[in-house]
Image: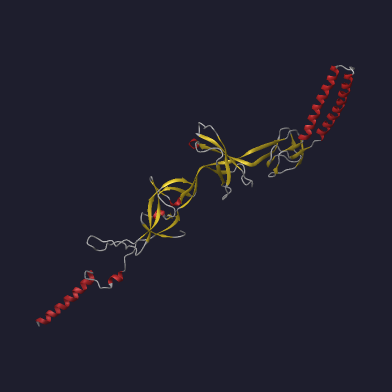
């Protein structure tokens, strides 16, 4: 009987120990437990876009904004009074210097000219006759001179009458585009009344008021690029025409005048433009996109892509594997932070004076999510 009780006790005790092991997971796992749990997750890969470090040219420039001005802008006035008989041009028409724009009624001026010329012809005959009589000493020098003076005065009157007839045809004082017409047929105009405005679109001027610190960098003859908000995607070439030799005391600026030539006449006077004056060019230098540059406090850096071999497993002091994300099984790409020295900067690229080499790949998109040495995955074009 004692043996049967001992066997029962051992069976119950064994079942209890098995349940306790299962509950506390303190017993050795079976050989398939590790496979069921699976490997620990590898370190995540940060998706990024990259660009190649290339050689090229970069320009240093000063940029400003201003409204375009016409170099030649003329207000055409009537030189004589009269009724507008005919208008020969309209707004927007290109005209040449001396072209007739409108005509006034000139009948009265022509009658006055005919009278003056007839009187002049009579006096011309008198002068000729007195000249012959003077040779014969029939008339005195005084009599001849009086006739000559009358002729000269009448000649001036005839010339003035002829000029009034010519001025009845209103002409363009400069070549350009008719910007404004201020009269209509049948209007009565007076002398010196504005009747047209003509603007010469070639060239146009962009006048900038530049801070005095730029005075040593800018000079006449430098190239400029002009863009207008009203004409997206278009750029126009210009040249610095002159630099003012003085600085305005109140504003601390000097005036730079840029000449803009536009054969297409797309640019218009008064149009708001952005002007960039190129004052230096660095050629055959290393360039990276502006998006690749990270500025933190006083340090400027880029993330360069490097291919690295898989590191050995990380172990603790007692020789066991550390509880960290598993290392990559093979070579992988890492983003390595490198300090760089910048040179000139344009709208899209930055000159790198030191820190990278031609052919390096730098991160352009995703830079904000990176740490030095982070595993990355390149997406998009590389």
Question: Which of 127 and 25 lies nearest the eye of the viewer?
Answer: 127
Task: Identify which residue is drawn at 21% across, 73% down.
Answer: 19
User: Residue 48: x and y, percent?
Assistant: 42, 58
User: Residue 126: x and y, percent?
Assistant: 87, 24
**Picture quarter containing residue 219?**
top right
The quarter of the rendered structure image containing the N terminus is bottom left
Q: Is residue 113 above or below residue 335?
A: above
The quarter of the rendered structure image containing the C terminus is bottom left
Q: Is residue 20 above or below residue 3?
A: above
Tell me if 51 is positioned left or right of 230 in this view: left
User: Residue 39: x and y, percent?
Assistant: 31, 67
Residue extending furthest toward the bottom: 1
Task: Identify which residue is drawn at 85% across, 21% down.
Answer: 147
Tell me if 292 is positioned left or right of 326 in this view: right
Tell me if 125 is positioned left or right of 49 in this view: right
Task: Identify which residue is drawn at 89% across, 21% down.
Answer: 132
**Picture quarter containing residue 40?**
bottom left
Residue extending furthest toward the front: 284
Question: Which of 368 and 58 lies nearest the eye of the viewer?
Answer: 58
Question: Which of 218 and 257 lies nearest the eye of the viewer?
Answer: 218
Q: Is residue 52 above or below residue 160?
A: below
Residue extending furthest toward the left: 2
User: Residue 325: x and y, percent?
Assistant: 32, 62
């Amino acid at each position: 009987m004692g043996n049967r009780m001992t066997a029962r006790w051992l069976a119950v005790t064994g079942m209890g120990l098995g349940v306790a092991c299962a509950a506390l997971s303190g017993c050795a796992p079976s050989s398939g437990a590790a496979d069921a749990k699976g490997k620990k997750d590898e370190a995540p890969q940060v998706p990024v876009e990259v660009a190649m470090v290339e050689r090229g040219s970069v320009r240093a420039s000063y940029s400003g904004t201003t409204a375009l001005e016409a170099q030649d802008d003329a207000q055409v006035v009537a030189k004589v009074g009269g009724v507008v008989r005919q208008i020969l041009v309209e707004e927007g028409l290109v005209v040449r210097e001396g072209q007739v724009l409108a005509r006034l009624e000139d009948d009265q001026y022509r009658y006055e000219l005919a009278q003056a010329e007839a009187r002049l012809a009579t006096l011309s005959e008198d002068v000729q006759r007195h000249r012959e009589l003077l040779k014969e000493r029939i008339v005195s020098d005084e009599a001849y001179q009086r006739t000559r003076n009358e002729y000269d005065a009448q000649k001036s009157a005839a010339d003035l009458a002829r000029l009034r007839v010519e001025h009845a045809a209103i002409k363009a004082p400069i070549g350009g585009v008719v910007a404004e017409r201020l009269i209509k047929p049948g209007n009565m105009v007076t002398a010196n009344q504005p009747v047209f405005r003509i603007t010469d679109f070639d060239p146009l001027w962009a006048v900038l008021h530049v801070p005095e610190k730029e005075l040593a960098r800018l000079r006449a003859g430098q190239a400029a690029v002009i863009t207008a908000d009203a004409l997206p995607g278009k750029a126009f070439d210009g040249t610095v025409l002159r630099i003012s030799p003085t600085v305005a005391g109140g504003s601390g600026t000097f005036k730079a005048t840029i000449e803009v030539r536009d054969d297409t006449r797309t640019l218009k006077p008064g149009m708001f433009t952005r002007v960039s004056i190129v004052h230096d060019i660095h050629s055959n230098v290393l360039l990276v996109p502006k998006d690749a540059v990270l500025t933190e406090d006083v340090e400027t850096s880029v993330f360069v892509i490097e291919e690295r071999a898989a590191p050995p497993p990380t172990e603790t002091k007692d020789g066991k594997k550390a509880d960290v994300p598993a290392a990559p099984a093979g070579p992988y790409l890492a983003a390595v932070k490198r300090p760089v020295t910048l040179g000139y900067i344009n709208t899209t690229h930055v000159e790198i004076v030191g820190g990278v080499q031609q052919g390096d790949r730098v991160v352009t998109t995703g830079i904000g999510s990176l740490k030095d040495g982070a595993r990355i995955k390149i997406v998009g074009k590389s």
